[in-house]
Image (cartoon, rainbow, N blue to C red):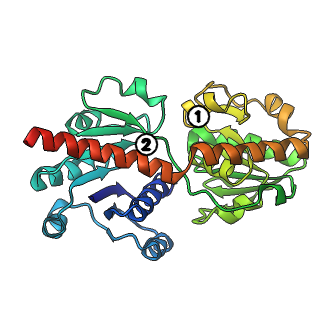
Amino acid sequence: MRILVMTRFYRNGQTTHVLDLCAELLELGHRVLLVLADLNDLVYLQRLKASGIPHLLTARPEALRKQLARWGPELIHNHSAHTLPAALILGQELNIPTLTTVHYLDFEPKQLLQKQAAVILISREMREDFGDLQVPCFVVENGVRLPRLRPRAKRWRQRALLLAQTTPEKQENFHQLSQCLLQWGWEVVSAGGGSFPGVRYLGWVHDVEPLLRGADLVVGTGRAIREGMAACCAAFVLGRYCDGLVTPENVEKLQTANFSGRAYRAPFCPAAAAASLAQPQPAYFQELGRFGRRYALQHFSSRKMALAVEEIYRSILDRRAKLQG
């Protein structure tokens, strides 16, 4: 298949998700062209070029028409509210179906999703919020690249990695937890948007895998939790809400809400966090890390994600062929 993938550049896991999907689709033998609008990060642009993913850096239909007409995509897979109007225009002009992956609950142009051939939701939690759509909806959870590692070789450092874009509603929670962790003897590193007293702050990091290899605990939501578990780290779900440590007992419940903190919607409580983090037992945290790794291998593979998306592409094109036939 020839697939046009469209999104706006975001300095978060959503863009990483799109790039991973493109890479997997290419490895599966498809032709992929990525349209990535508003890319304003030189390092990210260099990484994109090195990835080998064919790409264009504008989503303006007037700038894409001729090239796309020559390339001949069979469908358009959009990933952003900002590029959805352009995807619809191009789909109409090229007479090909469009579908959109919805990455967040507060997706604003919801009415435009009614014009899609299908909608992909990234969590089971989203089913209720988008259950009124009159188009086929599918749940395909985020996948991550699974790093090669030897889980039993990972040594204990009592190091916590805060891996998040700390938006205003999350900032106080991360501030409180970071100060608690320091008091409890943890070394704390922050990558993303949060700078806190006593915490080694790295800013935005394009390649987090080396940080994950050196961490025992990853704190964040969504993709950060999946990547942390895949790297054999214990994981603590903290965003606007706090779901705490991911354990074999609660992992399915937390996964339903994409490790967002919305599974229980509990406020962050230092006393509750102290119960699991104030006197960490290395053997327990290492076992959580090994559990997370096993769970990620079973559930979080980006190849598994791409295969599920591929099936949706086929169902859209098959349905279209039957209607035209």
Q: Is residue 17 above or below residue 114?
A: below
Q: Nearer the viewer, residue 272 or 71?
A: 71
Q: Residue at x 63, y 46 (%)?
A: 296
Provide the residue designation for mark 1. 255
Q: Left or right: 143 with respect to 103? A: right
- CA–CA distance between discs 2 and 1? 15 Å
Which quadrant does the C terminus fall into? top left
Q: Nearer the viewer, residue 205 or 31?
A: 31
**Residue type for callout 2:** His
Q: Residue at x 33, y 37 (%)?
A: 108
Point out the tag, 2 or 1, that comes first from the N-terminus.
Answer: 2
Residue 18 at x, y = what percent? 42, 56
Mark 1 element type: helix
Residue 156 at x, y = what percent? 87, 55
Provide the residue designation for mark 2. 103
Q: Is residue 308 above or below residue 55?
A: above
- The answer to whether one can see residue 59 in this image is yes
Q: Quadrant of residue 121?
A: top left
Q: Residue at x 71, y 31 (%)?
A: 268
